[in-house]
Amino acid sequence: MSNKNEILRAIRSNQLDPQPLPALNRADCIHYDDPLDQFCQMLRAVGGHHIRAHRRELADALDTIDAFRTAHHTCSLIESVPGNVELSSIDDPHQLETLDFCVARGVFGVAENGAVWVTDESVQHRVVYFIAQHVALVLPGQQVVHNMHEAYDRLQFSQPGFGAFISGPSKTADIEQSLVIGAHGARSLTVVLIDDD
């Protein structure tokens, strides 16, 4: 008998009895006095940035970002923000390899870790979140939950689709604790927190 078969046989003969999941006491979940402020702090901690703006001032707020102003190829999934890359005209996502900047909509944010939930609901090529050199996610300021438990409660999976939590720009680190930003994806992430008041 091969080593592989011996290992598999040993695993199969030592199955544990199923155990119920532990009960979650929501009173023990982390909550913040100001979840929006905590979200901004965590976003900075993971290498991201934020801008506060009124919905009518969104284009002006984006103009304060150097990477947006100097971008040659910009994809905007927000009606009020101009872009010169039209996703509907692109059949092969590989054609987006020169994308400098992407402006997209975030669904909600998480104060606990500075993450933003995004989906492919209005995105033809979901690779735009990861292939663009720089990403801005537009998020209503009141759509920030305290923790991941509340975040999971908000997720809906009624049909197949794509969703991801994005927390700051792409990062990687090695055992020598050398952190590299933008190694496998966007080099910067800005969350534009929209205030409708």
Image (cartoon, rainbow, N blue to C red):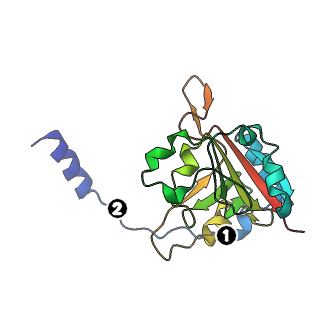
| Kind of residue sitting beneath label 2 | Leu
Pick the residue in front: 184 or 109. 184
Which of the 4 image quadrants contains residue 188?
Answer: top right
Between residue 197 and residue 48, name the one nearer to us: 197
157 on left or right of 51: left
Q: Which quadrant of the structure image shows residue 1?
A: top left
Which residue appears at 78% of the width and 42% of the height?
A: 65
* Count of labels in the image: 2
Residue at screen point 47% across, 70% down: 20
Report whether residue 125 is seen: no
Q: Residue furthest right?
A: 197
Judge from the rendering whether residue 187 lies leftward or rightward of residue 141; answer left or right: left
Front residue of 20 and 168: 168
- Dot 2: within a 10 Å radius of its alpha carbon, few (fewer than 14), some, or many (20 or more) residues? few
Residue 181: give x, y in percent of width and height.
Answer: 63, 33
Q: Is residue 178 visible?
A: yes
Q: What secondary structure is marked by label 1?
A: loop
Amino acid type of the residue that numbered disc 1 sits on in the rendered structure: Asn
Q: Position of residue 97 (x, y in %)?
A: 50, 41
Decide: is 56 above or below 190: below
Quadrant location, the C terminus: bottom right
Q: Residue 82's x, y, as percent?
A: 70, 54
| Residue 142 pos. (x, y %) | 80, 66
Q: Is residue 178 left or right of residue 111?
A: left
Q: Which circle's residue, 2 or 1, is located before the other in the chain? A: 2
Task: Check disc 1 and report the residue beneath it.
Answer: 25
Q: Which residue is mark 2?
A: 16
